[in-house]
Amino acid sequence: MLSLPSTADPDVVIAGCGPTGAVLAAELRLHDVRVLVLEKETRPAPFVRIVGLHIRSIELMAMRGLLERVLEHGRRRPAGGFFAAIPAPAPADLDSAHAYLVGIPQPVLVQLLEDHAIGLGAQVRRGSAVAGIEQDEDGVTVELADGERLRASHLVGCDGGRSTVRTALGVGFPGEATRTETLMGEMEAAAPPAEIAATVRDLGDKRLWLRPFGEGVYQVVVPAAGVSDRAQAPTLEDVRHQLRALTGTDFGVHSPRWLSRFGDATRLADHYRVGRVLLAGDAAHVHPPTGGQGLNLGIQDAVNLGWKLAAQVRGWAPGSLLDTYQDERRPVAAEVLDNTRAQMELLSPEPGPRAVRRLLTELMDVDEVNRRLIEKITAIGIRYDLGEGPDLVGRRLRDIDVAQGRLYGLLHRGRGLLLDRTERLTTGGWCDRVDHLADPTAALDVPGLLLRPDGHVAWIGDDQQDLDDHLTRWFGEPAH
Ligand SMILES: Cc1cc2nc3c(=O)[nH]c(=O)nc-3n(C[C@H](O)[C@H](O)[C@H](O)COP(=O)(O)OP(=O)(O)OC[C@H]3O[C@@H](n4cnc5c(N)ncnc54)[C@H](O)[C@@H]3O)c2cc1C
């Protein structure tokens, strides 16, 4: 039976409160969209996976006023050395005011993002798993595992690589199945740190490492091949066995905090949107963790989608705005999948890939090569295809100095922004959606520039009519 959304229903249901779901919830709340996040786990995942926030994600945190909180819990590290773990330092003049990496435990980051979303008014229901969906032209009915049915205008599947939402939609997820499995865990080691460091370094195998976390605790990564099967949870003995087989010693590892297994499956969803249901984050793309890009990609999906979906829900979206989410983000994910495939080859212990690795290591001494690879991993090189125009159109704008301080400080509310050095442009009937900063001192070499809420440049120029056309393209019809 058809049930229409009532005023008490959420506008948007998000399946999954991982990093992608939490960021999307916050982005939607910036536009007063009623959001309900359903998360199947009662508590955030305990795996203390240390992830790296790369430059573009750090910039997004700054754009939403979250960076100080993230830095309180994370460690700043140099931006370079991530492409296939080739230790090349980043060029000194990367195009960002935040040219570093933040290492932060994933559960800590997810909690911070979830708290932020809740602080903005999102509702998060833990212990609620999405089990099925039906959609019609008026909305989506979401069925939970306990049989409860909810109604919303839109549903977004941010429910990870094994996404129930993607499966229920019947969206294809082609790519390569896992070929290589890896065991990872955090544990104590009895052997002296110098001995561990020297053994691992001399081995030169990039698929085995013991990274010290201090106080005798190590993050340990070993190939899973040959020990335990996928159906069983990995054990400490599995890790010890692999260490002995590869190094001759198990370094006396003991007292694991946690152990997990991950594969290198590489897959991309055929569609990011089917009617009123969308996919974001790992639900839309999975790939090996080389270069540390998955979580970053998910956060960036969420910031691209948030304002567009909000515009759709609130009724001001121009006709094709929501489709630009897939048009822009799917090619970015395809590119990340490709660079992780390349990195996996470069990490192989086989003689051929090792030779290619030596060659690439040499080539990374060339500034342009190193820069291009770092811009890929850190996502600051992305340019969405927004049609013809100057090179900056479609790219994100760095955090520049403006009369009121820093540009990103003006983007906390997730609105569009007209940066106007001519002082004669206007946002007219769009001023309810787009802020206007008339500032002849802004550190820009263009007369006027329109920024979308995700910080990407939508227009450059000084002609009011041309600006109005672009305001209509991205922000819909002007208010009367
Ligand atoms: C070893 C390792 C190291 C990594 N290091 C990095 C790194 O350094 N940098 C980086 O960017 N990425 C890294 N990644 C990848 C990163 O962890 C993922 O890409 C990221 O967690 C994806 O976020 P997500 O929110 O899209 O999905 P997830 O984090 O998988 O979250 C999905 C959420 O949905 C919930 N859920 C699932 N099904 C349902 C359902 N039916 N109903 C309701 N809720 C549901 C889950 O419980 C979960 O909370 C690493 C991954 C691994 C394995």
Image (cartoon, grey):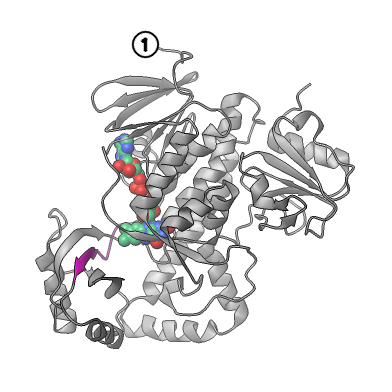
- Quarter-of-image position of residue 13: top left
The picture places residue 428, in percent across and down from the top left corner, at 81, 31
The picture places residue 294, in percent across and down from the top left corner, at 42, 56
- Quarter-of-image position of residue 207: bottom left
Q: Is residue 278 visible?
A: no
Q: Quick one: 170 or 255, which is closer to the camera?
A: 255
**Count of labels in the image:** 1
Q: Which residue extends farthest left?
A: 237
* Horizontal side of residue 156 vs 180, given as left or right: right
Q: Check the image and report above or below for 32 versus 414.
A: above
Q: Secondary structure at mark 1?
A: loop
Q: Quick one: 97 or 314, which is closer to the camera?
A: 97
Residue at (41% x, 12% y) in the render:
2
Q: Quick one: 275 or 78, which is closer to the camera?
A: 78
Residue under label 1, please give it. Answer: 1
The picture places residue 215, in percent across and down from the top left corner, at 25, 71
**Which stretch did the figure color magenta?**
177-188
| Residue type at the position of mark 1 | Met
Q: Check the image and report above or below for 249 versus 333.
A: below
**Does 435 appear in magenta?**
no
* Horizontal side of residue 460 vs 212, given as left or right: right
Q: Is residue 417 visible?
A: yes
- Quarter-of-image position of residue 390: bottom right
* Horizontal side of residue 401 vs 147, given as left or right: right
- Quarter of the N terminus within the rendering: top left
Badge 1: residue crowd in 10 Å (few <14, some 14–19, many ≥20): few
